[in-house]
Image: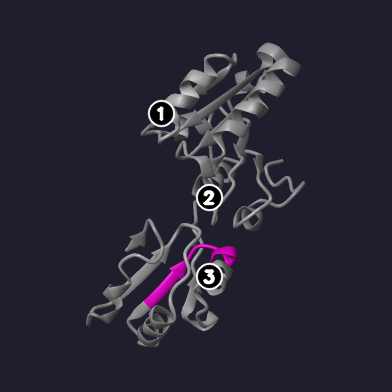
Amino acid sequence: FPVTIPGRYLTIFQFPIRVKYIIHSEIKINLSLIQRVYLETFLKKQNKLLIVVSDFSKQNVIDKWKINKNVVIVIRNYVEKVQYIVNQEILDTLNVLTIGNVELYKNPFFFTEVAKYFNKKYKNNISFTWIGSGSLYEECILLSKKISNVHFIGERQNVASYFKNTNTYFQPSLSETQGIAVLEALSFSIPCVVSRLGGLVESVINDYRDWE
């Protein structure tokens, strides 16, 4: 089962059932010596797996929890490439998209500062859209009203329609184990601008133009 806060529910390993403990988030909390010994003991059993989504995440687990690297398995998120016809109308404007929780670690305030800078430079030829909700959503809504062409639109069920009308994906996160939305953007052959940290650098190669 996926774990929202890594370190929770570790006692599940002691039960005589198959366990796949999947970590998507960056680990911030260390384990005690007793917890580490307990975890490694049960991870040696064939039906117990500790799974992470990137090399960065694996090293994060090893550094924080001080467990043997051989018990941590990397299974990367995967998105199939999408075949679609490019909307020619978007080529004359820069439509920037970000998807994620509106939380501090996703860096929404930097997103608005970047939008403010580019709006001054390109005026009406650029648009920034953020899909998602979170604890900072209302604050960002108020902030975006002061900046033209910046839109925090909350959660959306069908994000494919937004990708089809986007020509740049922007992920300014302060912490990211991999970033599934980045993979989705790449599946639409959209160039991505991302923070140089975490698992993002495993997905996006600088100046590599696979979409051409």
Q: Are marks 3 and 2 in contact (CB under 8 Å)?
A: no
Q: Residues within 10 Å of mark 2 (few under 14, many from 20)?
A: many
The percent position of residue 130, horizontal first and vertical second, equals 51, 30
* Secondary structure of the residue carrying numbered label 2: loop
Q: Amino acid at mark 1?
A: Gly
Q: Which residues are magenta?
A: 49-57
Q: Secondary structure at mark 1?
A: loop
- Spatial CA distance of label 1 from label 2 is 18 Å
* Within-10-Å neighbours for mark 1: few <14, some 14–19, many 20+: some
- Viewport quadrant of the N terminus: bottom left
Residue at image position (52%, 78%) is 66
Residue under the image location 55 percent in, 34 percent down: 108
Specify few, some or many for label 3: CA neighbours under 10 Å numbering under 14, 14-19, or 20 or more: some
**Residue hosting label 1:** 154
Q: Give x and y (percent) for residue 50.
A: 42, 73
Q: Earlier in the sequence, mark 1 or mark 3?
A: 3
Left of 101 or right of it: where is 60? right
Q: Is residue 15 above or below residue 131?
A: below
The residue at 66%/21% (across/down) is 116
Q: CA distance from mark 1 to mark 3?
A: 34 Å
Mark 3 vs mark 2: in front: 3
Q: Which mark is residue 64?
A: 3
Q: Is 52 contained in the magenta span?
A: yes
Looking at the image, which residue is at 58% across and 16% down? 149
Q: Nearer the viewer, mark 1 or mark 3?
A: 3
Q: Position of residue 4 (x, y in %)?
A: 37, 56
The percent coordinates of residue 165 (x first, y second) are 55, 26
Q: In the rendered structure, find residue 179 and report the number of the disc placed on it.
A: 2
One can see residue 153 in this view: no
Residue sitting nearer the eye, 207 or 197: 197
